[in-house]
Amino acid sequence: MIKPLHRSMLWILLFIFPFRLLAAEETENIGTRSAVIFNTLCAKCHEGECSGRLSFDTGSKSAGSHIRRYTGDTDLSREKIKEFFTLLNHMKKSCTILMPKDQTWKTDKLSHFALPSSKGYFIPLGLLESGRYRIDIAIKEDTPFKAEVISKHFEHLLEQEISPAKKENTLHFTISKPEHVFLRIQSRNLLHIDSLNIGKAR
């Protein structure tokens, strides 16, 4: 005979386990474009610890107007809003950045990691070992932009304002332990990356 305490634990496990499976399946279906938009424009609220206003308990339907406003896209489909809502759930529960696992960073695929507005990028740089690194960026336009290098858990490794005086720029940052690292770029004007290279700094 199952004791009351054991029975309670069994019900808890039966409730939580399917929920976790469902959450995993949902995150696996997130598109690259949705993840790029979310991590560039929306995840910053979480980093500033001001994401409490939009609780995942409200449901994706009631969050729709908020998501449309902050992504700058009033024509977002219901499916896209659900993707953003899934990303919000993941961020608030796991406190990590989520990018589709089947996407790796390649210089000829940079457009996949650009905002639809062409005013920013969110580029996964991969799992990097500890050490000093440099990123060389060449852009088409003569425009200022902000560059951030962040870890999967929102730790800032670099935050730098780039001058519009030159189109070729070099960023330097240091990693103390192996990290999944991302490059986030934001601009008030149109910005297109011609080339981007990352390597160990001497």
Image (spheres, rainbow, N blue to C red):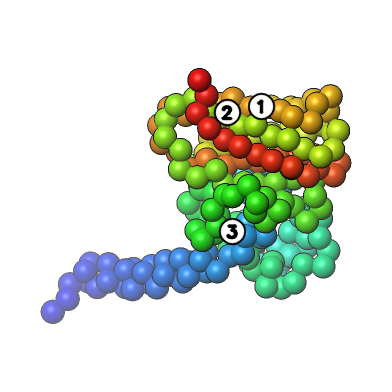
Residue found farthest to the bottom: 1
- The location of residue 140, given as percent across then percent down, is 81, 39
Task: Please tell me which residue lies in front, 75 or 19.
Answer: 75
Give the label on residue 170, or none: 1
Mark 1 touching mark 2, by CB under 8 A? yes
Which label's residue is closer to the chain start, 3 or 2? 3
**Residue linked to disc 3:** 87
Q: Amino acid at mark 1?
A: Thr
**SS class, disc 2:** strand
Question: Looking at the picture, does residue 17 appear above or below residue 94?
Answer: below
Q: Amino acid at mark 3?
A: Leu
Q: CA distance from mark 1 to mark 2?
A: 7 Å
Badge 2 local density, few (<14 within 10 Å), some, or many (20+)? Answer: some
Side (left or right) of 37 relative to 174: right
Q: Amino acid at mark 2?
A: Arg
Task: Please tell me which residue lies in front, 94 or 129.
Answer: 129
- The location of residue 175, given as percent across then percent down, is 47, 29
Which label's residue is closer to the chain start, 1 or 3? 3
Q: Quadrant of residue 129?
A: top left
**SS class, disc 1:** strand
